[in-house]
Image (cartoon, grey):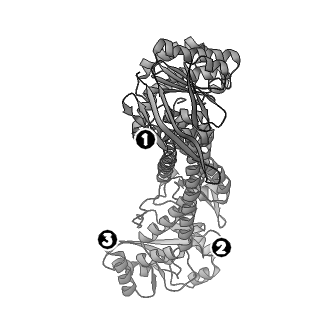
Amino acid sequence: MRRLLPRNYVFTILGIAVGVAGLVALGAMAERITRFIDGGDRFVLGQISVAGEGMGMGTGFTAGGLLRAAKIAEIARVPGVAAVQPQVMLPLNPSTSQFLTLTQELILGVDPGVRMPNREFRELPVREGRALRAGDRGVAVVGADFAGTRGLRPGSRLDLSARTFEVVGVLDKTLTAPDRFAIVPLEDARDLWLRRDPLLVQVFAGGGMTRADLNTGAAVAWADGVDPDALARRIQAAVSRLNVTIPGELSRLLRQSTAFFSALLFGIGVLGLVIGGLSLANTVTAAVFERIRDFGIKRALGATDFHLLREILGEALTVSVSGGAIGIGLAMAVGALVDARVLRQGQQLFLFSSRLLLFALLFSIVLGALAATYATLRIVRLSPAEAIRRGA
Amino acid sequence: MSVIVRAIGLSKTFRGPDGGPIPVLEGVDVAVGPGEFVAVAGASGSGKSTLLNLLGLLEPLDAGEIWFDETRVSALTRRAQCPVRGRSIGYVFQSFLLISGLTALENVLLAARYVGRPRREALPQARALMERLGVAHRSDHYPPQLSGGEQQRVAYCRAVLNAPPLVLADEPTGNLDEGHAAVILAALRSLCHERGASVILVTHRADAAALADRTLRLRAGRLETDRVR
């Protein structure tokens, strides 16, 4: 190692590490935003969400009115529908705006006996404990961020609208909406809804309704080979007084509404590449030029252009890999520290995906090699005497 | 008379800070035979070091020719000149020019690396040379850890490791005290006697020039005298 790498390359490695750390940290933030947007997109493309006609009573991904059991039965009869899962989705904090639904904490009531209709999320990954089971009451499975901000683990107690639930499971991190869910049995969610909404209690007490009518919406699964957008339009045509989301349209809408984040993401990525790339290329080039005298001496001893290029590329590879690895470690350490702090607010800022880390390492190697090649080509144009004079 | 190196009409002009030409050497002819010890003397700026750089293929010529034996090396491509420098010429510079990131032994072995000599073959020779020059105990030291005299002795070992037929020494004693200077001069002189190598020595020292078989005196870029002792 000592023969391959001059001792003063320690600072070069540190310089590269700082550049790569910047690239990786910015990239990790971009990855985090990408995962969030992609997760939402996958969700809306995985099911047809429906709600009763109207607006304001429900929440979640479809603003709409009460979806009664009769309507759910009608939907289930539409050709191409494989399953309909009634749901109750409530904001954890009713005073929270519904504007940013994907980022707010939600209570999701589902029937554990019915298979999740969403094709992209057939089963939510459980990190600790277990998923909900048929017949469960008074228990909850919570998302990773939801659990993290409250220190919840299986066996913990969770108060929701003056009702206490036992946490039986904590989901693995999905980096999208379910991270902020508290998932409870459908009947428990209906109870919570009734407790919260005096108007609903009056309507319910007026007769003509059963508990099965208390749904904020439903998730519709389609049969294999069925076009979901076409099926959504068929449901809309076949069942009256219904709000139906078209998965493709909702996905486009989601993309449009997150266009700012996408632009921000692009900007962060470009910034990371420019800052990290310039820092790395400048460090490697400067390190080579700093040793111009040494290369002049080597030329005087008979070194060819190829000898020098091979040596410099070898050194550049070593310092780039070392600097890249240290930079990645540095960025991950800083990211972990920052995330540990912001996790208290239920956020995660960085996602150090394997593709990002691999890209950062390859980026530092390729750019280091290019910078070293450029510097070598500049140096070998000089005569040995000129190189020695300039390096003196 | 056979000749190791012959230069015909060497000229070199540098550019000044204002871009104007500064002629340093003009039409210099030199011939050095095998085993000859030739001193190059002259005032500062007379072109001594430039002459050595041109003869050592360290600097491109503006005009003239350089022949090694029967080969016109000045006409070779840049790539083809590399093995000539590595195998046929050894350099000893006033400022030693050791690579600070390598140990003394590694600096010496560097000469073997670029001519394709296996390290295992060159290593015993490098150690023997360092032993002879009294720096073997400093093999694992880095240049900044060595005295000037020790650095120059290491540089000498590097210059002669490949047993080149021509050794160029540019003020090798300029930064040394009398004792160390004497060691280096004696070593250079012995090259001619023991190996039959030719040495061209640029020096200001009268005692060093006195060791030479012949002295070339430069004045303002021209060869003033070529005096045989």
Does residue A251 sit above or below A206 in this rendering? above
- Chain to which the residue tagged by mark 1 belongs: B
Secondary-structure class at tag 3: loop
Q: Chain of mark 2?
A: A
Contact flag, marks 1 and 2 (Cβ < 8 Å): no
Label 3: chain letter: A
Whether marks 1 and 2 lie on the same chain: no
Quadrant housing the C terminus of chain A:
top right
* Three-letter residue code for mark 1: Arg
Q: Secondary structure at mark 2?
A: loop
Whole-angstrom CA distance, mark 3 to mark 2, is: 36 Å
Q: Amino acid at mark 2?
A: Thr
- Which residue is the extreme one toward the right? B177
Residues at discs 3 and 2 both on one chain: yes
Q: Which residue bears the numbered disc 3?
A: A223
Residue A91: percent from left, percent from top:
60, 71
Q: Earlier in the sequence, mark 3 or mark 2?
A: 2
Check disc 3: other Cα within 10 Å, few if <14, some if 14-19, many if 20+: some
| Rendered position, A260 above or below A141 | below
Quickly name the residue at label 2.
A96
Question: Badge 2 local density, few (<14 within 10 Å), some, or many (20+)?
Answer: few
Tag 1 residue: B78
Front residue of B82/A92: it is B82
Question: Closer to us: mark 3 or mark 1?
Answer: 1
Dividing the picture into quadrants, the one containing residue B26 is top right
Residue A209 position, x and y percent, is 51, 81
Which is closer to the viewer, label 1 or label 2?
1
